[in-house]
Amino acid sequence: MSSVTFHFYDELNYFLPPYQRDTDFTHTFEGRVSIKDMIESLGVPHTEIEAISANGRGVDLTYLVDDNNRLEVYGFSSKLPVPNLIRPPLKEAPTFILDVHLGQLAVYLRMLGFDVLYRNDYEDSEISIIANKEQRVVLSRDRGLFKRSLVDYGYFVREVKPKRQLAEVVKRFDLQQYFKPLRRCIRCNGKLAPVPKEAVLDRLEPLTARLYNEFSQCPDCQQVYWKGSHYDNMLDFIQNIK
């Protein structure tokens, strides 16, 4: 039987039982085990990890753990004492794919202009394949989804209520710099395009037709948008995200 000493830092402690948080603890194991499998056996998704130190040296997720290793694991808010060898940095304006439980969060992110894939019948295997192929960030409340090796980028959403989830994700990925309201269809994620009023007049309520002259439409699902009171409410909502 071999053993190692672990220490997890910052938000990674969310996934650990109280007696393992913010402290050194011993973990025993048999055979040759990768650091990814060992960490995930403790309940911490590999997508939450920004860097790993093995005896003071930066390692990646394929590292095979040795007896008596000291392993220190760092999250996204940590000051990293070793290089991040886990994955390349995200490209600007990250794109997302969400699991079945986060439908309202998908609407809110699209409201802010982000490219967000969501269906209420996605299988975990399908999410992981799409995320890997398109380098999308997976958002989920299912730890099992993040154990899939195809998922490179992901975040376990801690909050339960959608507006708090949005604030959490905005903070985690520093999204405020990328806000572009009314650029995406909140129904299907299509890119909105300006459309002449005359082209959608037959789809408008009489009051809307009388009060507004500028419209956008989703070319995919044909949903029509305009800057009515709902748009002002959306802007107020965005400005109050903390």
Image (cartoon, helix red, strand yellow):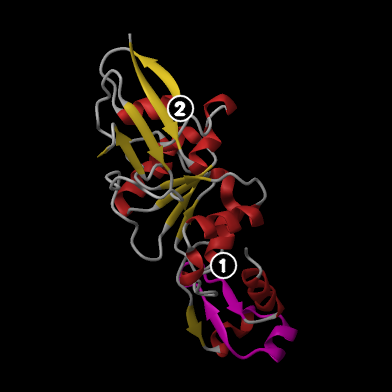
Where residue 211 appears, as percent x and y from the top left, is: 71, 90
Could you tell which of marks 2 and 1 lies nearer the N-terminus?
Answer: 2
In three-dimensional space, the C-alpha distance between marks 2 and 1, rounded to whole angstroms, equals 43 Å
Side (left or right) of 231 relative to 52? right
Where residue 150 appears, as percent x and y from the top left, is: 32, 40
Side (left or right) of 194 relative to 211? left
Where residue 86 appears, as percent x and y from the top left, is: 30, 43
Q: Name the residue rendered at 53%, 80% in the picture.
A: 216
Depicted 99 relative to depicted 5: above or below: below
Depicted 156 relative to depicted 219: above or below: above
Depicted 129 relative to depicted 216: above or below: above
Q: Name the residue rendered at 52%, 77% in the picture.
A: 217
The answer to which of 74 and 226 lies nearer the viewer is: 74
Task: Give the residue number, with chain letter if any, for mark 1.
Answer: 111
Disc ID at residue 215:
none
Residue 94 lies in quadrant:
bottom left
Regarding mark 2 in the picture, which secondary structure is present there? Answer: loop
Task: Give amino acid for label 1.
Answer: Met
The span picked out in magenta is 203-226
Task: Give amino acid for label 2.
Answer: Asp
**Was residue 207 drawn as part of the magenta stretch in this picture?**
yes
Task: Give the residue number, with chain letter if any, for mark 2.
Answer: 24
The answer to which of 165 and 77 lies nearer the viewer is: 77
Regarding mark 1 in the picture, which secondary structure is present there? Answer: helix
Side (left or right) of 109 relative to 83? right
